[in-house]
Structure formats: C-alpha cells, structure tokens
Amino acid sequence: VQLQASGGGLVQPGGSLRLSCAASGFTLDDYAIAWFRQAPGKEREGVSCISRSDDITYYADSVKGRFTFSRDNARNTLYLQMNSLKPEDTAVYYCARRFASGSGCHRSASVYNYWGQGTQVTVSS
C-alpha cells in the first residue's frame, strides 16, 4: 500500500492549488480516503474525507465551500482542489487510508494506518 501526495507549493492569499494523492497497491474505490493537515506546532487535523462508495464527502468547517475532494478511480488518484486559500491553510497536507476496506471516514488521525509523505502548502503574500 502506497500513497503519494503532491501538488503543494507557495500561493498568494485567494489563490488556488490542486493536491493529488496517487494510490498504489490497492483498489482506490474500496476504501475511504482522508486528507489531513498539520501546521507547525499544531496537531494534525482532518480536512476532508471521501467515503468508500463516494456517496458522502466530509469537510472540516474551516474549508467548507472552498475545498473539493474528488476521486478518479481509473487513475487510482484522488484530488483536493483548494480555492480561496488563506494564510491559515498553510500546513503540510497528507492523504491517509484506514486498514480495513469496511472502515468509513473518521476525524481522528490515529485510526488511519497508511499515510502519504505529505506535501507543503504555504499561503503567503
């Protein structure tokens, strides 16, 4: 099982970025996948999660209306489109998967077993 996050960078406030999470070693559609982020000195927090069947997508209140999480099963890749970025969105962003295919989305990072390496997002003028 491997998850590889990419797409981070430096962007001005109000700008956009699209993060990618390339999955390998498993069938993407069989698992709920989450995005977390961690800013310096802060705990890792859940940003968004897409359920196994794609019928439910969760977002943290702080990103609702600005971030969109999508899945491309053919490419085994997930995307987090981030618009109207704010300085407080600055963090390292991680994609994560739980161990069992039957497990749904959960807001706690501790229940996720597989993590990508993280990609840095910096929002600054």
Image (cartoon, rainbow, N blue to C red):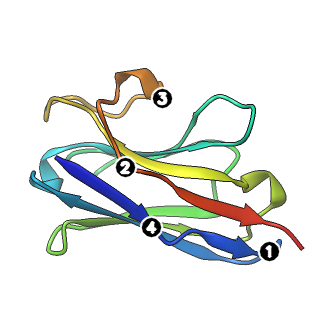
In terms of secondary structure, where does tag 1 sit?
loop
**Residue topped by disc 4:** 6
For badge 4, the amino acid type reads Ser
Q: Is residue 54 visible?
A: no
For the point 27% across and 42% down, the residue is: 32
- In whole angstroms, how far apart are the C-alphas of marks 3 and 1? 26 Å
* Quarter of the figure with residue 114: top left
Disc nearer the start of the sequence (2/1): 1
Disc nearer the start of the sequence (2/4): 4
For badge 3, the amino acid type reads Arg
For the point 74% across and 78% down, the residue is: 15
Q: What is the crowding at mark 2: few (fewer than 14 residues within 10 Å), some, or many (at least 20)?
A: many
**Residue topped by disc 2:** 116
- In whole angstroms, how far apart are the C-alphas of marks 2 and 4? 9 Å
Q: What is the crowding at mark 3: few (fewer than 14 residues within 10 Å), some, or many (at least 20)?
A: some
Disc nearer the start of the sequence (3/1): 1
* Up-down relation of residue 28 to residue 75 (above or below): above
Q: Which mark is residue 107?
A: 3
- In whole angstroms, how far apart are the C-alphas of marks 3 and 4? 22 Å
**Residue topped by disc 1:** 14
Circle nearer the viewer, 3 or 4 = 4
Labels 2 and 1 touching (C-beta < 8 A): no
